[in-house]
Image: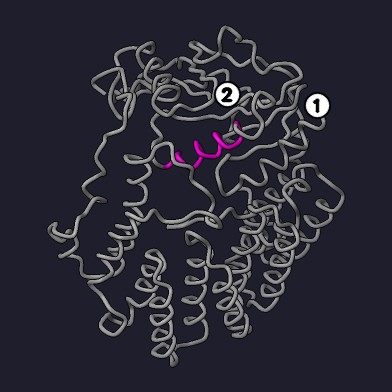
Amino acid sequence: MWGVAMCALTVSSSRVPASVPASVPASVAVSADSADPFVRYTTPGQCEQAAYRLRRTYWRDKRRDTVVYAPATDSVPAPVVEVIRQCASHFSVESVKTRELLDLAQLYIWSNQDDLAQKAMDRLQKVDAKLSVTDRGWKIYLYTKTLLNAFPTRMATGRTYLARLDAMGAPASTWRLFAHNEFSGYASSLDDTTMAESEARAGLAASKEMSADDRADWVYNILSAYQCLLTPIERTRGSPRALAVLDTALTDLLPSRPAGSREAAVLRGNIEEERAMPKALFTGGLKNVHATVWFGANGDTIRPKPGVTTLLVAASASCGGNCYPMYATIRRLHETYGSKLDIIMLTTTAGYFRSQPIPSPKIEADSVGHYWLTYLKLPVTGVVETTDFTHLDDGRRLNAETRNQREYFQVRPALLLDGNGVIRWMGRPDPNSEAIWNHVIRETLDRNS
């Protein structure tokens, strides 16, 4: 339900309404005298799912221009908290079944009722005392992850539970690895390299206590811990330290795979691909973005511009609430760097817009430009590239690869280019990686100056 950046690389009308509905969605705006919308809910887990939907609905329908932050500094909107508490009031720590206590604790965290969450966890650990350490460790890991990814992050409480997990020793070693990887990935997202490396080392220490079978099952989680030893910049610059860490990872992890097996070859290939990534990262040169239609370019359609740091974002106009965190980050980057950073959003025609078929690429492109620049008011230049396509025998549309996709985007959602067109960073610009984007943008601007 919540996610932290981990270290592993891994319309019937052609227009969108120009204004946001004035009313709050009925699912969020529940007044005291309204009929209880949760009367049929029987488990706290259903309330958790509702909480996630309500938060997304709030950003989508009520506050499209509201900034969204990473968990450390974000919060659940007050109207959503109010409704979640109404749902949570159907349950109590004393009345729910044991198997529902973890969900209830997570629900209380969502609704900013941390004292009740603590009571739920205290009861859970008491009734689970007879379970194996492995089973108890799994539940503590899940709750630790919840605390780490709450809005805002409950770091102090999360560390308390992480310490309990570490105290369980070898029987909980797998979940200790998972938890420390979560903390390391979280620290990396904040560009806190000291914490990221410390947590990664703790995760690797736990992995040494895992059984051979568990190490084989979770080999890529262990590899993630090795990757978390390195800063993102080290990993993408191919530093000697990065190569040494990857060599150590290969030596440590390859014995978990049968010699000569396909599994061993895949593992080796993943690590070798990581080693080779800097070579791919620094290829490039100034290749002009190809566009059928431009929006907001003001006649300046030679992009990327020589000497200008450019952020190219591959986006889909069909992406709504799920992309609002990315839109918020793009706005903040523009506010910080202004004309020093040229932000270009690119998309391709797909034959539909907002899940509705569109009769022509021109109408679809107009809809995209209106959505990005007029409705969302994004401070970007918009690029729409017409997609060639054929139809399969069953009628499905088969899109051909476009020029921008071929020259700039394979699997990465966004690229940062320096003034010479060299790729300096790849990833998704969202709140969970915003600190790293700022780091790399500043570094690139300094390089250009």
Residue 365 in which image quadrant: top left
The residue singled out by tag 2 in the image is 344
In this view, the residue in front, 280 or 425, is 425
In the rendered image, the quadrant that contains the C terminus is top right
Q: Residue furthest top?
A: 299
Q: Residue at x 29, y 63 (%)?
A: 47
Measured as percent of width and height from the top left, residue 369 is found at: 43, 19
Q: Amino acid at mark 1?
A: Asn
Measured as percent of width and height from the top left, residue 135 is found at: 47, 81
Q: Residue furthest right?
A: 240
Q: Are marks 1 and 2 in contact (CB under 8 Å)?
A: no
Q: Residues within 10 Å of mark 1 (few under 14, many from 20)?
A: few
Q: Residue at x 78, y 37 (%)?
A: 443
On whether residue 420 falls in the magenta region, the answer is: no
Q: Amino acid at mark 2?
A: Ile
Q: Is residue 245 left or right of residue 187?
A: right
Q: Residue at x 25, y 19 (%)?
A: 13
Q: Residue at x 57, y 67 (%)?
A: 217
Q: Which residues are magenta?
A: 322-334
The residue singled out by tag 1 in the image is 448
